[in-house]
Amino acid sequence: MMELMSCIFYSCEGNEMADFSKMLTDLGVNMGLHEELIQSLSRLHEKTHLSQTNRPETMRLFDEAFHESHGKRVAQIKEHRNNGGKSIGTFCIYVPDEIAYAADVITIPLCGGSGWAVPYADKMLPRDICPLIRSTFGMAVSGTCPFKKFKDLAVGETTCDAKKKAWDLFGFKVMEVPQKKTPLDRALWLGEVREFHRMMETLSGTKITKEKLRDGISLLNRKRKALQRINAFRILPNPPLSGLDALLVSQVALSQDIHEFIRNAEALAQELEQRVASGISAYKAGGKRILIAGSPSPLGYAKLHHIVESAGFHIVADESCTGTRYFRDLVEEEDGDMDSMILALADRYMKIDCSCFSPNTERLDNLLTLIHEFNVQAVIHHILQYCHGYNIEARFLEKELKKRGIPSLIVETDYSEEDTGQIKTRVEAFSEILDQKS
């Protein structure tokens, strides 16, 4: 059974499983614990995504990408490095991937989404910090992260105090994300982007030309446009894609080879067009249209989405860093010089409405735009435990939404399954309240 689940997770055939196992062993991965991890992830994926009926056939490509994250993807990065390329670990969507790609540097998202890894981090980190940080470092200290030896450096950012101190503890490079959006803050951020540009040139030993940077910007914009196209189908009265599967697509976008992802996303969009033409929906009729707002949901974590859609809701939008916040804005493409492209990049990333900003009126404006465009009937705020920025800001948003007659529910949780029953009860009670109001 163990070998079968490993092969499913690695998406391997024939001798590939043995090859992947040898590769991971050579990288120093603790194979016994790694087996426990992938079994845990496989069980959860089967419980959530694979339990759905009437899924688009093309979603199998994204299931495979999820399973390949510790097999084929590791092999791809290994080959890139064997050919002289570099790779860096990242933890936030503020890191400008366009610049890294222009220097032939692969960015590896390291944010953990598994509750399995958390106890290992608790041996060295406080328990009262967010599960994302604990899961990430739990993977590293348990010896189950296959990318640990693949990063030439790790780039953190200053979006919360727990992250900042974790970066200090582990000696990572840090990009200073301002806490306001005044001209002074924008100048500071522009300086950080320029420094990242220099950092990538030094790391790769490659001079980033304006042609390479232009290509990097175009490539990342193509990925964002593919995500925008897929999510536009969720505006329809009968969406052809579930919120659970839309989340998986966005999660995979952060980790899969970018060219492979774009091909798969375009194939999915074509199938969704066919489903719409044939009148095929991912949902049964009658469910309330819900927007999930707040904390990110890294690859391997979909607990709240599963509970909400199992209660009969239709999740039609995600206002998070694994949702619209990641792909909403494009970088302006222009045939300018290097400095103008760096400025366009800095401007695009400064539009991200993270809860670290104060004031953060942009987030309310963007949320209301989503509610209007996607005909949202209620909002569920997803708050990872100890994620103080999004937790406090959810109270402000809840108040503003109430003024506009939009019901909302705040759910604070972690990566474990222990509170599943409690959340299910709260979500079902919320559904009854909405039914009474309609």
Image (cartoon, grey):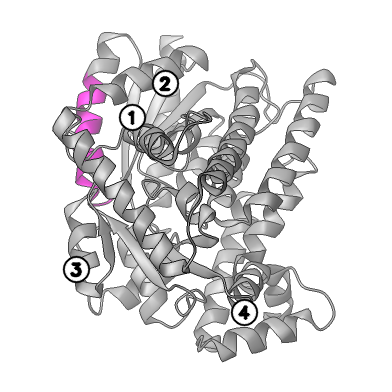
Q: Residue at x 41, y 61 (%)?
A: 200
Nearer to me, 197 or 227: 197
Gap in Å between the C-alphas at discs 3 and 1?
35 Å
Q: Earlier in the sequence, mark 4 or mark 1?
A: 4
Distance from disc 1 to disc 2, alpha carbons, whole Å, reads 8 Å
Q: Nearer the viewer, residue 425 or 46?
A: 46
Q: Which numbered disc flags the more N-terminal residue, 3 or 2?
A: 3
Report if the CB atoms under discs 4 and 2 are less than 8 Å apart.
no
Indicate the position of residue 188 as horizontal and vertical percent values.
19, 42
Labelled pair 1, 2 in contact (Cβ < 8 Å): yes
In this picture, which residue range is highlighted in magenta? 384-399
Q: Is residue 50 visible?
A: no
* Image x and y of residue 127, in percent: 21, 66
Callout 1: SS: strand
Q: Amino acid at mark 1?
A: Leu
Q: Amino acid at mark 2?
A: Ala
Label 2, on which residue?
Answer: 378
Q: Residue at x 75, y 30 (%)?
A: 272
Does label 4 or label 3 sit earlier along the sequence? 4
Q: Is residue 5 visible?
A: yes
Residue 79, percent across and down?
A: 65, 75
Give residue 409's mark: 1
Q: Name the amino acid type tagged 4.
A: Asn
Q: Which mark is residue 215?
A: none
- Name the residue carrying label 4: 82
